[in-house]
Image (cartoon, rainbow, N blue to C red):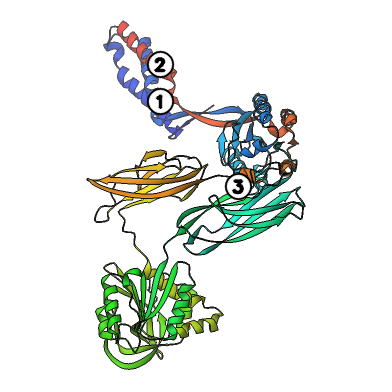
């Protein structure tokens, strides 16, 4: 125990001096005046001096520093595998009863000498021992990592973990076991018997596809103890078999990749199934099929390339756009085209408007309907009609002459990203043939590239884009862009940079703004072990976010049952959770009420089966044995787990630890000092009263 103060202890004598001076001043003439005897006067002065000195000493904020000794028990982490794969073995009843009792007895036995922290792991780590065996995935590495984050330190003595060694999420758990730096005792569960089994191990596929396109599907088929058997691999949409392949299992173990090509014939989220037809000798068929979902989009952008006459530029641009999923490109000539602009998302005009009156009327109609247009100017372009379109570039003083102009990339162009290699390529491409005239940009336009005539960089745009009143347009101020595609292949061996430039222009022009005032967002496919979450946004007529609308949604399953939910306000709009739903297809209809106005939206969501725990059924005890060997623990059978308390008792690292740490206590908090001061003052007051003074 040590006394210390917030201020210097050298001030303590001043406290005594203050008490003595105050007592002397009070009692210096009291002996004769009040009739005190000299001895009584001295006692009274001493009582007052001591009381005042103690009170003054408290102004120094005195504290007592004490060393406190604490003995801590070592900590043992006990982890139980809660995954569903343990229920695929032969004796599931023993798993839920006998093993559960043994593990609880182990927890009790260890609790006498250790602090036992029990967890159940699967997809995540949960407190306590749970033997429901319902986890749809096993992530042992995350479990060990969380034990390290929560319990690592000198108090952690050991980790005990049971399981079948089947890991289907996360990284290799060996690395996280090594980080713990304590013995890891592993208890082997599950069945290592290799029974005849045919399984769909994995399915690789696109997440989205456009309607009418074909998409690839690759399935990995595995088999054990089935050499010489034959089977068929089916690809089904719903219950309809689309295509199948015969397989002869000619090895043991057997692994084969089967490839399919499927055409997307229906829009929306489509459920497909890869199924390996069961053979007679199979022990289990639970892993013979896997479902997967593909979102088929019916949103292909229709692009019209309309030209005054045949030109090599047309083929170059058509090839660049045709190589992208989502674009349907049509090429037409003004002389024989009689279509309407309403069916197109983007129109490329090559040397139009020009001499063809019908084509000029089509262009004016497209402008009036707000359809984005990409203009390629040439010698056949009527500049007065082009200027009337307000496309972002104005051409004045035009003459029937041509200027060769190379591109100089605009350094401040920020409408969309241009990669460094694309910028370098543009500046190395050959010149375009630009109609003679004075070129200027409107306020709504931005130059992607400027014209360079000879060695002189001009202020005339070569490529420009414009956004005005919600309508987008772009202009290439010269013909001969086909030479850029040839130059790209000559310089780089591919057409990638040229194609990228044309596609970026098309993507910018054809991007459709979402004008819906009520929007619902959610994952189209949700695993059965996760919650179905919805978010909503509501806007008023000025497209301002509305925070006080009433929003609700109703889900309907395949049997017609309704599940209504209400949205709650959130930081980014509204949110609703439908919880974990049974596997199946659900349609939904949402409604928003705002100031008497009703807005609706509808869609569908799919809840898919989680089959990770059924894919592999043979326990991997080698992994558990390796973890125990690397960390200095033991690999045990369930009947041997009673050896763990003995092993830990013999380990010096598992002993209790004594910790000494300082503890500070304010002296003013000690009540006996208060009562001592009170006693001093009370004694002084009593003596004064007995002596006839106040």
Image x and y of residue 153, in percent: 61, 39
Q: Is residue 27 above or below residue 483?
A: above
Label 2, label 3: how many angstroms apart (C-alpha)? Answer: 66 Å
The residue that disc 1 covers is: 16
Q: Is residue 320 above or below residue 396?
A: above
Q: Nearer the viewer, mark 1 or mark 2?
A: 2
Depth check: give the residue in front, 3 or 66.
66
> In the rendered image, which quarter is residue 281 located in?
top right
Left or right, residue 267 beside residue 394 = right
Check the image and name the residue furthest to the front: 240
Q: Nearer the viewer, mark 2 or mark 3?
A: 3
Left or right, residue 455 beside residue 359 = right
Q: Earlier in the sequence, mark 1 or mark 2?
A: 1
Depth check: give the residue in front, 584 or 692.
584
Check the image and name the residue furthest to the left: 596
Q: Nearer the viewer, mark 1 or mark 3?
A: 3
The residue that disc 2 covers is: 675
Q: Which mark is residue 359?
A: none
Depth check: give the residue in front, 3 or 526.
526
The residue that disc 3 covers is: 169
Mark 3 element type: loop
Q: Earlier in the sequence, mark 1 or mark 3?
A: 1
Left or right, residue 647 beside residue 213 = right
Report the quarter where the N terminus lies. top right
> In the rendered image, which quarter is residue 616 located in?
top right
Determine crowd level at label 1: few under 14, some 14-19, many 20+ residues with C-alpha closer than 10 A. Answer: some
């Amino acid at each position: 125990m040590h006394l210390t103060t917030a201020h210097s202890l050298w001030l303590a004598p001043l406290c005594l001096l203050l008490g003595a001076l105050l007592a002397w001043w009070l009692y210096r003439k009291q002996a004769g005046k009040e009739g005190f005897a000299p001895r009584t006067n001295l006692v009274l002065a001493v009582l007052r001096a001591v009381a005042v000195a103690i009170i003054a000493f408290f102004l120094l904020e005195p504290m007592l520093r004490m060393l406190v000794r604490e003995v801590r028990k070592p900590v043992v982490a006990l982890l139980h595998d809660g995954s569903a794969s343990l229920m695929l073995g032969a004796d599931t009843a023993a798993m839920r009863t006998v093993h559960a009792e043994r593990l609880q007895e182990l927890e009790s036995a260890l609790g006498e000498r250790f602090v036992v922290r029990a967890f159940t792991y699967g997809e995540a780590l949960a407190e306590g021992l749970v033997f429901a065996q319902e986890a749809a995935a096993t992530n042992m590495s995350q479990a060990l990592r969380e034990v390290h984050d929560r319990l690592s330190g000198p108090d952690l003595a050991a980790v005990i973990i049971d399981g079948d060694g089947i890991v289907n999420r996360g990284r290799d758990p060996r690395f996280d076991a090594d980080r713990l730096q304590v013995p890891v005792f592993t208890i082997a569960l599950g069945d290592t018997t290799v029974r005849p089994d045919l399984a769909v191990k994995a399915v690789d596929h696109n997440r989205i596809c456009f309607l009418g396109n074909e998409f690839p599907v690759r399935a990995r088929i595995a088999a054990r103890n089935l050499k010489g058997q034959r089977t068929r691999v089916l690809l089904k949409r719903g219950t309809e078999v689309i295509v199948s392949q015969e397989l002869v299992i000619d090895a043991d173990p057997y692994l084969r990749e089967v490839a399919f090509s499927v055409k997307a014939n229906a829009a929306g989220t489509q459920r497909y199934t890869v199924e390996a037809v069961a053979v007679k000798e199979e022990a289990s068929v639970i892993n013979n099929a896997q479902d997967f979902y593909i979102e088929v989009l019916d949103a292909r952008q229709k692009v019209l390339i309309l030209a005054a006459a045949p030109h090599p530029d047309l083929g170059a641009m058509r090839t660049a756009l045709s190589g992208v999923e989502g674009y349907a490109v049509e090429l037409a000539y003004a002389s024989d085209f009689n279509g309407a602009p309403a069916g197109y998302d983007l129109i490329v005009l090559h040397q139009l408007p020009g001499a063809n009156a019908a084509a000029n009327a089509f262009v004016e109609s497209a402008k009036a309907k707000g359809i984005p247009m990409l203009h390629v100017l040439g010698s056949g372009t009527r500049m007065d009609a082009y200027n009337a379109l307000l496309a972002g570039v104005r051409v004045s003083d035009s003459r029937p002459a041509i200027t060769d102009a190379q591109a100089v990339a605009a350094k401040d162009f920020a409408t969309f990203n241009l990669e460094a290699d694309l910028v370098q390529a543009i500046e190395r491409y050959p010149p375009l043939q630009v109609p003679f005239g004075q070129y200027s940009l409107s306020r709504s336009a931005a130059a992607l590239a400027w014209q360079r005539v000879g060695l002189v960089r001009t202020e005339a745009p070569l490529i420009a884009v414009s956004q005005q009143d919600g309508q987008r347009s772009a202009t290439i101020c010269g013909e001969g862009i086909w030479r850029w595609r040839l130059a790209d292949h000559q310089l780089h061996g591919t057409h990638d940079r040229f194609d990228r430039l044309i596609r970026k222009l098309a993507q910018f022009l054809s991007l459709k703004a979402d004008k819906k005032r009520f929007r619902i967002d959610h994952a189209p496919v949700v695993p059965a072990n996760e919650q179905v979450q919805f978010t909503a946004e509501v806007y008023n007529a000025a497209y301002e976010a509305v925070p006080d609308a009433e929003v609700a949604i109703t889900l309907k399953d395949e049997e017609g049952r309704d599940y209504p939910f209400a949205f709650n306000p959130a930081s980014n709009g509204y949110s609703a959770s439908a919880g974990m739903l049974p596997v199946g297809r659900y349609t939904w209809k949402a409604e928003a009420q705002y100031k008497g106005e009703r807005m609706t939206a509808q869609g569908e969501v799919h809840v898919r089966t989680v089959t990770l725990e059924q894919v592999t059924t043979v326990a991997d005890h080698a992994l558990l044995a390796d973890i125990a060997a690397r960390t200095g623990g033991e690999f045990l059978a369930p009947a041997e787990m009673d050896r763990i308390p003995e092993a830990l008792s013999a380990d010096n690292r598992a002993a209790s630890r004594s910790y000494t740490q300082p503890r500070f206590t304010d002296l003013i908090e000690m009540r006996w000092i208060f009562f001592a001061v009170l006693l001093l003052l009370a004694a002084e007051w009593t003596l004064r009263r007995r002596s006839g003074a106040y």
